[in-house]
Image: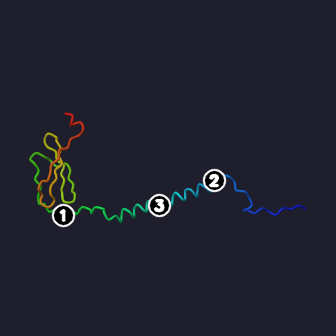
Amino acid sequence: MNRRPPLEAEDLPEPPQVRALRRLVTTLTVALILGVSTVAGAMVFRITRADAPAPFDPRAVTAERLVIPEGETVVAAGAAPGALILATRDAEGRERLRLFDAATGAPLRALALERDGDAAR
């Protein structure tokens, strides 16, 4: 009698679909590891940067008052280290950025804002 021993799982040839699936899973695993490593590295880089600007401290503003011209209204306000910034609009609709010293409230500069369509008029 001619009996063959049963084939072991390792002896069977791997179907092409399984081989392709194995390559795909390996590729995706490598891509996932690289992506997570990149994000983690970027986070560490951003957290440990020495030249990162210090966050604005509102306690640094010691000015008691800011004086803006009569007829102008404040439409936005912001702060930067050492300066307060007000966006104002006058009765004619012209807008300006006004910079004030954060410690004294003294006006530092006023910049007129023009939109592209306004400059042609």
Q: Quadrant of residue 62?
A: bottom left
Q: Give the x, y percent position of residue 78.
A: 21, 54
Q: Give the x, y percent position of residue 68.
A: 11, 50
Q: Quadrant of residue 14?
A: bottom right
The number of numbered badges drawn on the structure is 3
Mark 1 / mark 2, whichever is N-terminal: 2
Report the residue at 9% width, 47% height from top.
70
Mark 1 → mark 2, Cα distance in angstroms: 63 Å
Disc 3 is placed on an element classified as helix
- Mark 1 vs 2: CB contact within 8 A: no
Q: Give the x, y percent position of residue 40.
A: 43, 62
Disc 2 is placed on an element classified as helix
Q: Amino acid at mark 3?
A: Val
Q: Amino acid at mark 1?
A: Ala
How many neighbours does mark 1 have within 10 angstroms: few (below 14), some (14-19), or many (20 or more)?
few
Dot 3 corresponds to which residue?
36
Mark 3 → mark 2, Cα distance in angstroms: 24 Å
Quarter occupied by the C terminus: top left
Report the residue at 20% width, 44% height from top.
113
Report the residue at 30% width, 63% height from top.
51
Q: Which mark is residue 60?
A: 1
Dot 2 corresponds to which residue?
20
